[in-house]
């Protein structure tokens, strides 16, 4: 069924700017509970905390390697309403929020495995209720875990709140990053044999004419699924450098950045709309200067917001950003509301 598509080049509006989360680390992702009007944000747990069952405060390096995460619950203005800690889950690069009654269940990665870069990523998915103040371990017998793609690594998820689906991203056994979309009800029942879509991840820097010496290879910082479309957010913090042609190049210039949002048709696996033959950064992938006045400014996560649940097809997509100095990071969300209706 054709679905509306976000107008990537529509204006980006300031929804929430530089608000605190439970911890002072960089947010990695966020998601909306559209039924109860809350926002959930994930971040690696900060250094120096001693949680229940820990014999001493834990360092930042160990939190990263262990895959320990902090989840903050916000109201729609960015005020902290609660928090919980997850131990052994992963990096929090993406998350799904599923409203259930007056609260929400979260879909995250779990069973973290350390990587060579000092972080860790989950090898499976987990679904659990948000319980403020709780410390949840990946080994908990009460935790529902799933293996959508056996043998895969780097698993994350997102909930499509418009069409009731679960999008997943994973590194398949062939080493290729892929996305699948599943019916949310079936996913909850641990049924993964009937994917609605399966595509390989596209490289935005492979688009003809990509200005490599200007923007480099921006990191994937989050994704979202609505209907037949996958949205990806790429970019790096201000001042990030990359070696290109033997030269160290600043690929995210202060006040400019290299943040791009792109759209992929899940039915074809191709960019939609198609990138023009001559590269145009206002099409797809689409450059955004949202929140460009932030210091540090690292893009972190996409979230699907439905202002009025009686009109679920009228959705917006929020773009997350981290800012502020190390040890005092803040979270910001700018939103795009323009939609292109199917013809």
Image (cartoon, rainbow, N blue to C red):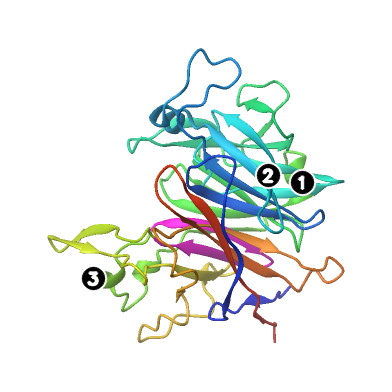
Q: Nearer the viewer, residue 279 or 58?
A: 58
Pick the residue in front: 101 or 160: 101
Q: Main secondary structure of the magenta part?
A: strand
Name the residue tied to disc 3.
213
Indicate the secondary structure of the residue bearing disc 3: helix
* Cα separation between marks 1 and 3: 45 Å
Q: Is 89 placed above or below 299 here?
A: above
Residue 201 seen in the figure: yes
Q: Say which of 170 and 15 sits in front.
A: 15
The stretch in magenta equals 219-235
Pair 1/3: label in front: 3
The reply to whether the magenta stretch includes residue 226 is: yes
Tell me the residue that label 1 is attached to.
Answer: 186
Residue 199 x %, y %: 53, 59
- Residue 5 on image: x %, y %: 64, 76
> Which disc is residue 226 wearing?
none
**Callout 1: SS:** helix
Q: Kindly identify the residue that appears in the image at 47 percent across and 77 percent down.
A: 284
Q: Is residue 35 magenta?
A: no
Please give the residue where the numbered disc 2 appears in the rendered image: 192
Quarter of the picture holding the N terminus? bottom right
| Direction from residue 144 to residue 60 in the image, left or right | left
Q: Work out whether residue 167 can be spotted.
A: no
Q: Pointer 3: residues within 10 angstroms few (<14), some, or many (20+)?
A: some
- Of marks 1 and 3, which one's residue comes earlier in the chain? 1
131 vs 286: above or below:
above
Residue situated in front as seen by the camera: 147 or 286: 286
């Amino acid at each position: 069924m054709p679905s509306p598509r976000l107008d990537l080049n529509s204006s980006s509006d300031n929804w929430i700017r530089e608000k605190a989360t439970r911890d002072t680390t960089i947010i990695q992702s966020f998601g909306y509970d559209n039924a109860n009007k809350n926002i959930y944000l994930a971040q690696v747990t900060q250094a120096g905390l001693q949680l229940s069952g820990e014999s001493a405060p834990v360092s930042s390096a160990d939190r990263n390697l262990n895959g320990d995460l902090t989840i903050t619950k916000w109201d729609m203005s960015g005020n902290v309403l609660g928090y919980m800690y997850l131990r052994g889950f992963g990096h929090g690069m993406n998350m799904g929020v599923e409203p259930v009654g007056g609260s929400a269940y979260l879909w995250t990665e779990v069973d973290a495995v350390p990587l060579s870069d000092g972080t860790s990523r989950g090898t499976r998915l987990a679904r659990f209720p948000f319980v403020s103040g709780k410390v949840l371990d990946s080994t908990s017998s009460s935790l529902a875990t799933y293996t959508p793609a056996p043998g895969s690594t780097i698993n994350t998820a997102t909930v499509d709140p418009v069409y009731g689906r679960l999008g997943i991203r994973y590194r398949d056994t062939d080493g290729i990053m892929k996305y699948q979309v599943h019916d949310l009800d079936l996913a909850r029942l641990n049924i993964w044999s009937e994917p609605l879509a399966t595509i390989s991840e596209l490289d935005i820097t492979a688009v003809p004419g990509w200005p490599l010496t200007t923007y480099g290879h921006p990191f994937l910082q989050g994704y979202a699924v609505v209907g037949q479309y996958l949205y990806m957010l790429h970019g790096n913090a201000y001042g990030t450098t990359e070696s290109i042609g033997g030269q160290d190049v600043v690929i995210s210039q202060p006040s400019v950045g290299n943040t791009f949002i792109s759209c992929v048709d899940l039915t074809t696996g191709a960019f939609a709309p198609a990138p023009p033959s001559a590269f145009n950064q206002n099409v797809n992938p689409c450059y955004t200067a949202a929140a460009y006045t932030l210091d540090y400014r690292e893009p972190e996560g996409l979230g699907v917001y439905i202002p009025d649940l009686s009109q679920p097809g009228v959705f917006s997509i929020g773009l997350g950003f981290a800012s502020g100095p190390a040890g005092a990071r803040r979270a910001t969300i700018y939103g795009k509301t323009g939609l292109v209706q199917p013809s």
